Image (tube, coloured by chain):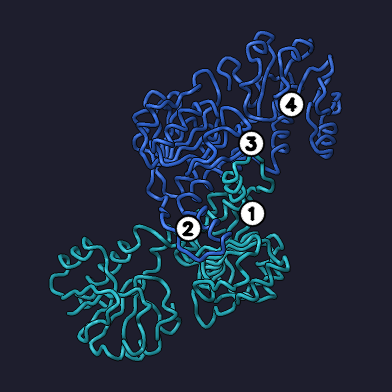
Chain colours: A cyan, B blue
Amino acid sequence: MKISFTFEPKPVIQQELQEQFPNHEFSFEKGVAPDRDTAIWVTYGEDVKEAAIKSLPELKWVSVASAGVEKMPLNLLHDKEILVTNSRGIHKTPMTESIVGHILSLYRNLPAIYTLTNEQKWEKPRGSKELRGSNALIVGPGAIGEEVGRVLTALGVEVTGCNRSGEAIEGFASTVSLEQLDHQLASADIVISLLPSTPETHHLFTKEQFHKMKDTALFMNFGRGNVVSEQVLVEALKAGEIGGAVLDVFEVEPLPERSELWGLPNVVISPHVSSHSDFYVERAMEIFSRNLSKWEQGDTDLENQVDLKLGY
Amino acid sequence: MKISFTFEPKPVIQQELQEQFPNHEFSFEKGVAPDRDTAIWVTYGEDVKEAAIKSLPELKWVSVASAGVEKMPLNLLHDKEILVTNSRGIHKTPMTESIVGHILSLYRNLPAIYTLTNEQKWEKPRGSKELRGSNALIVGPGAIGEEVGRVLTALGVEVTGCNRSGEAIEGFASTVSLEQLDHQLASADIVISLLPSTPETHHLFTKEQFHKMKDTALFMNFGRGNVVSEQVLVEALKAGEIGGAVLDVFEVEPLPERSELWGLPNVVISPHVSSHSDFYVERAMEIFSRNLSKWEQGDTDLENQVDLKLGY
């Protein structure tokens, strides 16, 4: 069977795959459309367009080495009964470390310490706070949110989850459903969105919801940019409805130069890097290998399968 | 009995103490020597000098609202059989949050993200690392070190403690004695000193020890500045014997303008602020109240008593 990669993992990883799966024909070519006889397409996802899918009559499975699939033609893939798997979960460790790092850094005043270090000034900056005893609300907690919640709990934070059903999450102090979100926003010191991009989550955070938040609240978006309109977020920050924001994702990326988010005090622009890790491809390939072993046995109940109707 | 404070807690705290202990005469005066009939002196410690002690014939107990007592005339206090208690342990939460925050911030590249945010540049900085799976060595783990170790363990770090005896610390992967320190230095990604200032810890980290560390190691000093000579540390950093340093304490504070530590890349100068907390005095006064209740019962086995011979 023809397996086409449209990115190029390190040679050692390519070799391991070929040795582990000698019965398949692998190709690794970045920036080139997959061969017409490709049955399995391994990609970061950005090149999965309608025309490409229509030109691959043998395509049975698209294995995506990232987590977001919102830009892919999911309906067409659904109609053609093509399986899609992604690499959700592999971001768990680096993203948790980034999110918790951002929180501790702001609470303990590290940006001011860095500035004073650069200016070579000995001066005790004011305004550091203790994180212990504060409340965090994690909206959309999958594998990443559960890990963030676990670490924050170890730091003495009261963690509430908010998911579609309100189904309890192990280790969280409490969990509420999306319908109860508004009520929870008022008591959260930190609101962390890890929501995927779906029709349901589009602009889910509205002006009214920022108004309900504490005026000291820290809003963190590490899911997808379009859960909040940039304009709504800018206005909430300018009006002091919230205390600040740390943003790893944006409605438009790269964040345009003219965006008003640049230059607002108390806003950290993390250019979609929180998931960066030296182990990224390695971990994505571990999932792919496990799935390919299943596939060879005729088992199509693959790990990390995307529900093409729900979009994640 | 006369109880003299040489600092001024908030009025509400003063009132609570007077209500809780109506049989004593309290005075709260910052910058003024205690009255001659003072039996209990409550202080931040900086004013506990030989002459002051000699002028207080009734003095039985010095209650220090900070942790370090190294500048106090401990021998004289010992000879005069004056009890000394300190407030060690109350720094546990803010210091742990600062230490773990500094580690995560550097591993996840937050200083570069802050700089790019300020410069209004969308650019993905390189060099972020995962903390999980790394090794931390905590030298001198008392209450603070144990808490730092607990949180780092929750983040997937392999934590080794190093104390005088090598006695095991609950929750740590391993503990070694001070004699085995040299051997451990070679495998630590992060070396955290929380040592107090005593004759034994003076310049304990030598040139040879920095040479033994990984050239990528992060050295953090959050105990006392004189565990390493500034010159030795500067040379180790300049020679690339270690990867960087985060320093909250220094041989001379404030760190002099001419110090070479200013301006070295990969050095963060935290101006002795990691223990800052809004709850500081409150927590110190809780310990004092518990001890004063004991004292009233004639019990001199006080909490946080300082061993005047060991110096901590």
**Which residue: 85% across, 26% down?**
B27
Query: Which amino acid, by three-letter code, is at mark 4?
Result: Thr
Residue A246: where, in percent of width, then height? 57, 62
Relative placement, left or right, of A82 versus B74 is left
Q: CA distance from mark 1 to mark 4?
A: 31 Å
Query: In this view of the protein, can residue B1 be seen by the observer?
Result: no
Q: CA distance from mark 1 to mark 2?
A: 18 Å
User: Image quadrant of residue B285?
Assistant: top right
Q: CA distance from mark 3 to mark 4?
A: 16 Å
Asked if the residues shown at circle 2 and circle 3 are in contact, with their CB atoms under 8 angstroms apart, the answer is: no
Chain under callout 4 = B
Query: Which amino acid, by three-letter code, is at mark 2?
Result: Thr
Does A15 sit above or below residue A48?
Answer: above
Asked if the residues shown at circle 1 and circle 2 are in contact, with their CB atoms under 8 angstroms apart, the answer is: no
Chain under callout 3 = B
Q: Which residue is mark 4?
A: B43
Query: In this view of the protein, can residue B196 be seen by the observer?
Result: yes
Q: Which residue is mark 1?
A: A134
Q: Secondary structure at mark 4?
A: strand
* Of callouts 1 and 2, the N-terminal one: 2
Q: Nearer the viewer, mark 1 or mark 2?
A: 2
Does B167 sit above or below residue A31?
Answer: above
Residue A292: where, in percent of width, then height? 24, 72
Q: Which residue is mark 3?
A: B90
Outermost residue toward the top? B79
Query: Which amino acid, by three-letter code, is at mark 1?
Result: Ser
